[in-house]
Image (tube, rainbow, N blue to C red):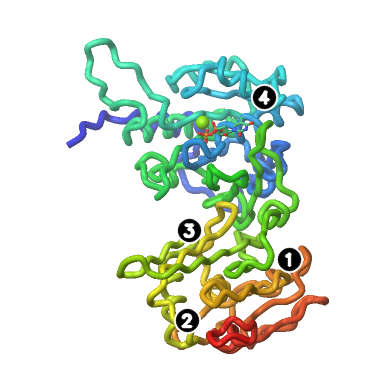
């Protein structure tokens, strides 16, 4: 049982918003004020369909250490660089730490203000004083909405508790709506998206952005999970470097730069991430089974799809894997869960199991059915266009695939067995 304190009356928030009490014809509602403010960080604006909307609240979620504070400091600095006043509420890091980081990023514009502290009640005063047009609160889990008198119980619990996070978010949303200042909240999320805080906030805010990647790699992906002011299909790509985040213009360079050639088990597949196509390298390795049952290790891939593909490979394509440990991974820290990766997984494992390397100018796209058939996938033309653009000249595709881009030879296959046979990595060799 958790005691919850009564919330501030809704009427006060409604008053502050100046909402009309009665119904009005929709046609008489004015649509002014919805103009977006570009922040100046291109990839961030791309994901937001242009920029932040005044008075809107955006939640930026991501695992600790992924780069949320860095990204938003750069966003603040870019917005400030164009002459706007912006405010960072830093509840996790001291002003001193933020200053050091800003220097590292080469971004200490005069109109970037910082408010150090954890009390959201200090915010309305600061907003009235500074009149910013962008506020970042870092993070929603570390602010609190009320400092209980000494000796009193903490009615709202410690910062980060569900009731604190909710209450703070409520107040920040009201403040954003009342003041018309675009507000971004940072929310830490664990690997499986747990931590009641941010997930419970998703319905409160206008936009939910997710900042993803693997801390051990430089690539970071920014996407909109929810966006009330535009589409959610865009993907922003950043590279984390010595001086912060930079836009990745050519993901192929980052993702395929270190690809070995002539090694069995490697293949490239063009995956869709939102509306963007990324060529990712998939690698498979097989070893004699150390101990039953055989290991099936999937890194960056869907474990279920790997197991399914292995079953089809053994039962329908004549590549026995039941006494092999199989390891499959996606390079670059990207997660690939789409069925379109099946064919590439199947070919990579067949190549690893037979020791026959696949051609380096080859990509593979297709979903595998349980009968061993290769099925059509979404956005095939787009995937092949991107593969051709970055220099691939051959593609293994489903039999029903439409014509490919100029300069790309299509190897149309009906079944996984046909694919392994045509590429010389069926059991029995070429
Ligand atoms: P941070 O923005 O603090 O992550 P979050 O707010 O999501 O917890 O960034 C954390 C990591 O980024 C940290 O391990 C150091 C690294 N980093 C760089 O590699 N280059 C940089 O210029 C900066 C500022 C951080
Ligand atoms: Mg941080």
Question: Contact (CB < 8 A) between labels 4 and 3?
Answer: no
Q: Is residue 104 above or below residue 303?
A: above
CA distance separating discs 2 and 1: 28 Å
Q: Earlier in the sequence, mark 4 or mark 3?
A: 4
Q: Is residue 142 above or below residue 245?
A: above
Q: To which residue does mark 2 refer? A: 313
x, y percentage for residue 232? 59, 55
Q: Callout 3 environment at 10 Å: few (<14), some (14 to 19), or many (20+)?
A: some
Q: To which residue does mark 3 refer? A: 299
Mark 1 C-beta closer than 8 Å to ligand 1: no
x, y percentage for residue 101? 62, 23
Mark 4 C-beta closer than 8 Å to ligand 1: yes
CA distance separating discs 4 and 1: 35 Å
x, y percentage for residue 77? 68, 27
Q: Callout 2 environment at 10 Å: few (<14), some (14 to 19), or many (20+)?
A: many
Point out the frontmost of discs 1 and 3. 3
Q: Residue at x 75, y 24 (%)?
A: 83
What secondary structure is marked by label 1? helix
Q: To which residue does mark 4 refer? A: 104
């Amino acid at each position: 049982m958790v005691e919850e304190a009564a919330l501030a009356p809704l009427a006060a928030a409604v008053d502050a918003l100046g909402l009309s009490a009665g119904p009005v014809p929709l046609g008489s509602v004015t649509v002014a004020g919805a103009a977006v403010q570009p922040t100046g960080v291109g990839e961030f604006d791309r994901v937001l369909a242009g920029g932040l909307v005044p008075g809107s609240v955006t939640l930026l979620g991501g695992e600790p250490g992924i780069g949320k504070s860095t990204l938003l400091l750069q966003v603040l600095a870019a917005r400030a660089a164009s002459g706007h006043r912006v405010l960072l509420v830093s509840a996790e890091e001291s002003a001193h730490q933020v200053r050091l980081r800003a220097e590292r990023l080469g971004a200490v514009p005069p109109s970037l203000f910082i408010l150090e502290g954890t009390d959201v009640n200090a915010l309305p005063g600061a907003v009235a004083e500074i009149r910013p047009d962008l506020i970042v609160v870092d993070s929603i889990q570390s602010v609190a909405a009320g400092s209980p008198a000494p000796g009193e119980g903490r009615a709202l619990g410690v910062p980060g508790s569900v009731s604190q996070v909710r209450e703070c978010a409520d107040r920040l949303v009201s403040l954003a709506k009342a003041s018309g200042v675009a507000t971004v909240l940072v929310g830490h999320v664990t690997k499986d998206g747990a931590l009641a805080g941010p997930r419970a906030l998703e319905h409160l805010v206008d936009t939910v952005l997710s900042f993803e990647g693997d801390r051990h790699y430089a690539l970071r992906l920014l996407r909109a999970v929810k966006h009330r002011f535009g589409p959610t299909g865009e993907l922003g790509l950043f590279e984390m470097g010595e001086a912060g985040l930079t836009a990745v213009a050519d993901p192929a360079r980052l993702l395929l730069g270190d690809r070995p050639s002539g090694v069995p088990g490697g293949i490239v597949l063009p995956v869709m991430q939102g509306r963007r196509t990324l060529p990712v390298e998939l690698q498979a390795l097989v070893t004699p089974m150390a101990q039953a049952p055989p290991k099936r290790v999937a890194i960056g891939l869907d474990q279920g799809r790997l197991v399914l593909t292995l079953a089809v490979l053994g039962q329908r394509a004549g590549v026995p894997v039941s006494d092999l440990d199989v390891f499959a991974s996606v390079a670059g820290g990207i997660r690939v869960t789409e069925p379109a990766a099946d064919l590439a997984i199947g070919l990579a494992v067949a190549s690893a199991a037979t020791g026959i390397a696949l051609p380096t100018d080859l990509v593979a796209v297709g979903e595998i059915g349980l009968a061993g058939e290769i099925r059509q996938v979404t956005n095939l033309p787009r995937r092949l266009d991107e593969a051709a653009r970055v220099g691939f000249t051959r593609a293994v595709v489903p039999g029903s695939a439409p014509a490919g881009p100029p300069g790309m030879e299509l190897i149309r296959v009906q079944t996984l067995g046909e694919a392994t046979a045509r590429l010389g990595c069926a059991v029995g060799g070429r």
